[in-house]
Amino acid sequence: MNASDAVREGLIPLLPRLRRLARALAGQVADADDLVQIVLERALARAAQWRPDAALDKWVFAIARNAWRDELRARGRTQHLFAPEEAGEMAADRTAQPAQQLELALALAALPPDHREVVALVLVEGMSYGEAAELLEVPVGTVTSRLARARATLQAHLGKDA
């Protein structure tokens, strides 16, 4: 099996995680869906660049992160959240009330993109700090500090004690 076939087969089980990551990065369902489509197109077009000894999920998540950064640059502005009814779907806690989910979605969307990336990778996807640092190409200390600042911002926004 060549790399292209391996990528094609490996993408399908990654779709739920990729969509969850895209929602955490983009904040809006429509933007997340567009991001997933862009990532899949890029991954398939560049399948020959993937090394079989590398983790496919990390490679695909790096494509997602870079594609989202490209989109933000192309827009020429920071992300704004227009909170449609389905915005609460993005929250990981399905036991929360819809109002809590929307409040969490708004708080996540208010984070700077670099903080949102770390939250998405570590808290949503469950990557270790080291894995996230490797994917983001930053030191582990940067991941730690971004996550700490993101948590503090989220707690302040949600009215929780630190």
Image (cartoon, rainbow, N blue to C red):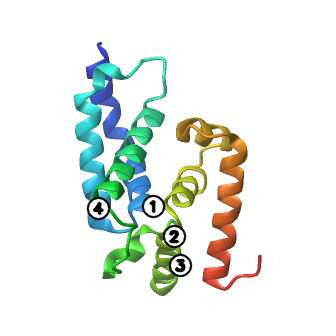
- Residue 77, position as x, y percentages in the image: 36, 66
Residue drawn 32% across the image and 62% down it: 76
* Cα separation between marks 4 and 3: 33 Å
The numbered mark, 2 or 3, whose residue comes first in the sequence reads: 3
Q: Residue at x 53, y 68 (%)?
A: 111
Cβ atoms under marks 2 and 3 closer than 8 Å: no
Q: Quadrant of the C terminus?
A: bottom right
Give the amino acid at mark 4: Arg
Which mark sits nearer the N-terminus, 4 or 1?
1
Q: Is residue 67 left or right of residue 104?
A: left
* Residue 71 picture quarter: bottom left
Q: Which mark is residue 96?
A: 3
Which residue is labeled 1 in the image? 24
**In this picture, is 37 found above or below 44?**
below
Query: Which residue type does callout 2 highlight?
Result: Leu
The mark that comes first in sequence, 2 or 1, is: 1
Residue type, mark 1 in image: Ala
- Which mark lies nearer to you, 4 or 1? 4
On the image, numbered disc 2 is attached to which residue? Answer: 108
Question: What amino acid is labelled 3 in the image?
Answer: Ala
- Residue 31 figure quarter: bottom left
Which label sits in the foreground, 4 or 3? 4
Q: Which residue is mark 4?
A: 75
x and y percentages locating residue 36 in the rendered image: 30, 50
**In whole angstroms, how far apart are the C-alphas of marks 3 and 1?**
17 Å
